Image (spheres, helix red, strand yellow):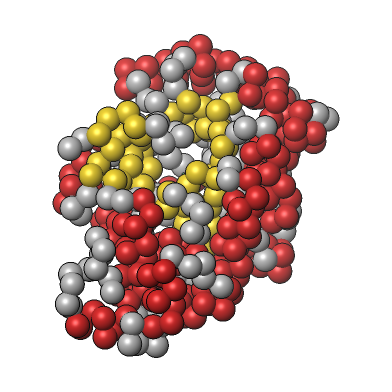
Amino acid sequence: MFTDGGLPEGDGRIREKVLAGPLGDIAEKVLQGERLTREEGIRLADFPDLITIGLMADYTRRRCVGDTVYFINNAHINHTNICKNLCRFCAFGRKAEAPGAFVLTLDEIAAKVDELKAYQPTEVHIVGGLNPDLPFSYYEEMLRIVRRALPDAHIQAFDAVEIDFLAEVSGLGVEGVLCRLQEVGLGSLPGGGAEIFNPEVRHEICPKKISGERWLKVHETAHRLGLRTNATMLYGHIEKTADRVDHLLKLRSLQDKTGGFLAFIPLPFLPENTSFSHLPRTSGFDDLKTVALARLLLDNFLYIKSFWIMLTPNLAQVSLAFGANDLDGTVREEQIAHDAGATTPQYQPSEIFLRMIREAGRIPVERDTIYNVIQRCT
Ligand code: V47
């Protein structure tokens, strides 16, 4: 057991720990590559022995996706923080008249992407607030500007919540908006806005946001149109274990149906400057267990991404031993996490990713957004 590319043969301690322990039945299923149930997910998530869960997640990671760990040379742009939803967990969104509210003009966006030319990012990642003053033409023109300046970069832009908003603003519907944005360069959708699908939790943390069902519908529509998308889960606020598991299982079901998701990114809640600033930050223990849980339940997702900006580089690196196989990217400028108290830098050069990944005994690969290999850094 745990021998084929997994753990050292004959390590009785580990066998005893995992197979003869209270999660032995789940470990057997993991070894057989069998799908885990909701109840098993809840048992895993509630089980205090992080190492046991980590061993299973690492085994699954190695068997399913091997030793490659991905990173990307990308750049984030946040075009506005004015938002009509003002989610209670979010420190980034503002009312138009609030201090610090901003909208980048199209000229400012042009100047920003011009600056990016020097770094030749292979991805430009764009997300912002739901700003009622911006016409649909602003979004189309923004993508044209990025495409003109960086014709080879993949544009990953506008999460499902923004797409739903644009469908309303433009009167084009979700499919209409996605087609129009595809025509001007949209390549894929980021995974934000998923939060936690449970409607009661959603009502408490983001009462004005589209429902989880609607979020899933937007992704399903995108997948039907040939757009790949990512998925996230915001954890560590008021949700319960079962809410996390149910969230992951909803993503797994949609992935069974469409196969359109690329990466899953667990996002630890950062409480500063939010309505939940009284809550503590997530613990390293919980962060690693959440990565492992995602790897074990999301058996149809190839990429479990640890977003180093929110997780910290150190924990993101350790998460490579708990099921993760992607560290996201260079980023360069980030506001959503930093407004909520992230103390990480906003930029990390490729060399740091190489070191983080090699130190973990894995093979660094620079990828593009849809996981084509740009460079295998052996
Ligand atoms: O949609 C907002 C979350 C998301 C907070 O798709 C918060 O590859 C923690 O989605 N604490 C934006 N999280 C970031 C995001 C993302 C990041 C990196 C890669 C990808 C990808 C997507 O951040 C928001 C929201 O879910 N968020 N406020 C907060 N206080």
Query: Residue 275: image x %, image y %?
Result: 58, 62
Q: In the rendered view, would you say 151 is above or below 52?
A: above
Residue at 34% x, 87% y is: 21
| Residue occupying the point 17% across, 78% down | 11
- At 32% across and 28% down in the image, what residue appears? 374
Tally the marks. Answer: 0
Q: Is residue 279 above or below residue 115?
A: below
Does 155 sit left or right of 287 as displayed? right
Q: Which residue is nearer to you in this view: 344 or 230?
A: 230
Quadrant of the snapshot with the C terminus: top left
Question: Residue, x 31% and y 51% (percent of image)?
Answer: 66
In this rendered view, identify the residue nearer to me: 23 or 174: 23
The quarter of the rendered structure image containing the N terminus is bottom left
Residue 347, given in percent of the width and then of the height, sits at 32, 38
Q: Is residue 338 above or below residue 321?
A: above
Q: Is residue 78 left or right of residue 217?
A: left
The picture places residue 67, in percent across and down from the top left corner, at 27, 50
Question: For residue 233, what is the image quadrant?
Answer: bottom right
Quarter location, residue 28: bottom left
**In front here: 209 or 197?**
197
Is 143 placed left or right of 302 in the picture? right
